[in-house]
Image (tube, coloured by chain):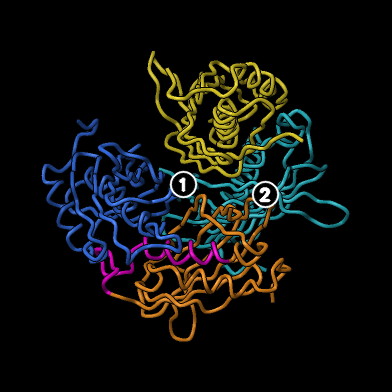
Chain colours: A orange, B blue, C cyan, D yellow
Amino acid sequence: MSDFEPRDADYERRVRESFARQRAMETFGARLLRVAPGEVEIGLDFDEAFTQQHGYLHAGLVTAIVDTACGYAALSLTEPGAEVLSVEFKLNLLSPAAGEHFVARARVVRAGRNITVCAGDFYVLKNGGEKVVATMLATMMKVLKQ
Amino acid sequence: MSDFEPRDADYERRVRESFARQRAMETFGARLLRVAPGEVEIGLDFDEAFTQQHGYLHAGLVTAIVDTACGYAALSLTEPGAEVLSVEFKLNLLSPAAGEHFVARARVVRAGRNITVCAGDFYVLKNGGEKVVATMLATMMKVLKQ
Amino acid sequence: MSDFEPRDADYERRVRESFARQRAMETFGARLLRVAPGEVEIGLDFDEAFTQQHGYLHAGLVTAIVDTACGYAALSLTEPGAEVLSVEFKLNLLSPAAGEHFVARARVVRAGRNITVCAGDFYVLKNGGEKVVATMLATMMKVLKQ
Amino acid sequence: MSDFEPRDADYERRVRESFARQRAMETFGARLLRVAPGEVEIGLDFDEAFTQQHGYLHAGLVTAIVDTACGYAALSLTEPGAEVLSVEFKLNLLSPAAGEHFVARARVVRAGRNITVCAGDFYVLKNGGEKVVATMLATMMKVLKQ
């Protein structure tokens, strides 16, 4: 259940089409699991090709997934034709990205006219539970296509 | 020329060996260009496999490279046997990562006993010049291997 | 109700004594409202002496209160004798700090051996409800007194 | 010497008038030392009334001064009638704000149409030299008055 009202009834299609155009998401094997007004969930599996020196997922990959989830959480609340750009993000790394399956969950904290602030978390799935790996606070900007 | 004195004469070898163990850097095609005390430079070429929905390099890839450069800038000033973990980073995206060739440059802002703060920038190389794409401020923590 | 177990039964006294030593909190008129394991709440009233050019509370004052709440949320989980320093924080400003009464709420996101990550929010109290003014993600470091 | 061209010849007067309207700056005893296109410098003296529990200047006060310097660095490059709001900032605390005299220096990193990114540092003046206390990376948004 989301606290937000979408301004475009077709928001999920717009998010899914944009996600499908991201070659990086395909390369990383990321899957868009859930799209709700102001909320997005992305799944990812471990891939040795994207590890850092200790064999865990690289922080850049964690960032890619959480930033993407934050961006689409923001996009889900925009009017038709709008796009969203990342202005900046901050990521705190809380525990190693060690495991087989991961999920990122992002939600809009506040949607302004031009600026939307989102929070996102990256979890490793373990023994039927979840453990938080990283947490992001991000600033997104709405851009209207010309 | 660097402002810092290394505490380990063998700092460059330690940085290069750790970089070589990062499978993600190999997958991204990143190259460790320069290692000096408190300063590291990494080169990267455009690869369509890592693009976002507008065809530019994904912010997560930019993050991966600048975070790695920041981490090794910090590592270059540590004593033998020490490792460095990213505690957190903040990245501002200044212009699209559009181009063929990129370089990240990171430098230590302050090296403390446990915490080292680094700044890094990501540039696109164009017409013999450079244009800044993103800027990072990052916090690294020294960890002594058991 | 807090998710954390305190390591020092006397945690609240330590937090309150440290808060009482902060001359800035006294000058700002800040009040320590609530201390629970991993959670702290601070109240503040509007004071024209600390306004910015539009007559709202200055972002630096908002930062002072939320950073302090985050620091004490971290301190509440430490062992006797430990202190906590702010390593860094990021604050997103979501709406003007316009109103008469404010409250900051901070909670520990993850408490590590040396590093504790906290999140904090600053609200204005209005018509029996609350509106979020700013949100912080902060990194704290434990220091053991010599 | 600044790298930026002002869009308003009268930029310094606009910055100084806005600074003069900040009651918080007056209360803190902050002085606007220098205004150049894209660059601003603010001076501050130690005041026990704004200290934290160890007797150093509170991080919130450091933030207030550096954020203000960043905001006016951004404002100095805007057209007549524009104002600037802080969207967010991140501050790394590098050493205690211990000393009698301080200076904050901010500069524009990149001025976009709506978003301007600034960097700022806070120094303590000691024995004829300076020591960095904190460093900020901040996002500012231009707002046109109605």
What chain is tagged by disc 2? C
Residue B134 position in % (x across, y down): 40, 46
Q: Is residue A54 magenta-colored?
A: yes
Q: Give the residues in magenta.
A: A48-72
Residue ID for mark 1: B92
D129 relative position to B74: left or right: right
Give the vertical position of B122 relative to A136 (above or below): above
The answer to which of A82 and B76 lies nearer the viewer is A82
Q: Quadrant of the C terminus of chain B?
A: bottom left
In the rendered image, the residue lying farthest to the front is A146
Which amino acid lies under the numbered mark 1 shown in the image of this protein?
Asn
Give the vertical position of D96 relative to D36 (above or below): below
The answer to which of D67 and B50 lies nearer the viewer is B50
Q: Residue at x 46, y 23 (%)?
A: D124
Q: Residue at x 81, y 51 (%)?
A: C125
Residue A94 position in % (x across, y down): 44, 62
